[in-house]
């Protein structure tokens, strides 16, 4: 039987139930950094990385109804920040993040990246293909325009959590901006009913 998630005027069908969730956020960050390092004009700073991670988490929540990685996201002045990764990358400031300084360090990172499930890599590639060419300031402007950050951010306050439901609901009501997990299909209610009839035969 097809599994449905309620969208605004549509539903989501999971082609397979085996979608990996609640991963180590460092694995996801390393994958984005590896995509960036392969470019001549690598430009992923800590600000850009946090925004890419937010966009991945929000879209994953929208299409799968679960977290991609196990970390809260907080609303900072300059946009969403991944709580578990902030201490690790804050010292880079506005500098481009260097994945590894030597061959041994690179091999260690590569081994970790190989642990990332294939369905996750495919999803992250979709996020990167859409947003990888955005600058950090462009992603800051983008996330500042969306309700999840706007509703969570309180000037002068710390640890303002961006609620999972707010991220999920925002992208479910802005389907033209949504990125779906490769094992998820966005179908109309009529198409869902027709599919269920066929599966019942």
Image (cartoon, rainbow, N blue to C red):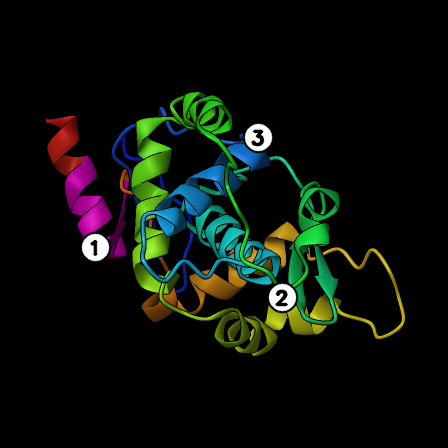
Looking at the rendered structure, the secondary structure element under dot 2 is: helix
Q: Which mark is residue 144?
A: none
Q: Name the residue under label 3.
A: 24
Image-quadrant location for residue 81: bottom right
- Residue 74 pos. (x, y %): 72, 56
Q: Name the residue under label 1.
A: 190
Give the crowd class for mark 1: few <14, some 14-19, many >=20 residues within 10 Å: few
Q: Earlier in the sequence, mark 2 or mark 3?
A: 3
Residue located 72% across and 47% down the image: 83
Eye-nearest disc, 1 or 3: 3
Question: Is residue 82 visible in the rendered structure shown here?
Answer: no
Looking at the rendered structure, the number of numbered marks drawn on it comes to 3
Q: Main secondary structure of the magenta part?
A: helix
- Residue 153 versus residue 147: which sits nearer the camera? 153
- Residue 191 versus residue 159: which sits nearer the camera? 159
- Residue 30 pos. (x, y %): 49, 38
CA separation in Å, label 1 and label 2: 30 Å
Would you place residue 179 above or below residue 119 in this image? below
Would you place residue 156 above or below residue 75 in this image? below
- Residue 90 pos. (x, y %): 71, 52
Q: Earlier in the sequence, mark 1 or mark 2?
A: 2
Q: Do the residues labelled 2 and 3 touch (CB within 8 Å)?
A: no
Q: Mark 2 points at which residue?
A: 148
Quadrant into which the C terminus falls: top left
**Start-end of magenta stretch:** 184-196
Looking at the rendered structure, the secondary structure element under dot 1 is: helix
């Amino acid at each position: 039987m097809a599994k449905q998630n309620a969208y605004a005027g549509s539903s989501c069908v999971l082609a397979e139930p085996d979608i990996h969730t609640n991963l180590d956020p460092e694995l996801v960050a390393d994958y984005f950094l590896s995509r960036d390092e392969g470019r001549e004009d690598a430009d992923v700073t800590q600000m850009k990385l946090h925004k890419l991670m937010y966009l991945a988490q929000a879209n994953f929540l929208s299409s799968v109804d679960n977290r991609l990685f196990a970390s809260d996201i907080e609303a900072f002045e300059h946009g969403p920040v991944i709580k578990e990764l902030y201490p690790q990358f804050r010292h880079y400031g506005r500098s481009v993040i260097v994945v590894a300084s030597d061959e041994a360090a690179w091999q260690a990172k590569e081994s970790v990246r190989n642990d990332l499930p294939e369905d996750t890599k495919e999803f992250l590639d979709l996020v990167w293909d859409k947003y990888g060419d955005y600058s950090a300031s462009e992603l800051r402007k983008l996330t500042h325009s969306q309700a999840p950050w706007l509703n969570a951010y309180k000037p002068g306050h710390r640890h303002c959590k961006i609620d999972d439901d707010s991220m999920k609901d925002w992208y479910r009501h802005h389907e033209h901006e949504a990125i779906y997990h490769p094992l998820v299909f966005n179908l109309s209610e009529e198409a869902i009913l027709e599919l269920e009839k066929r599966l019942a035969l």
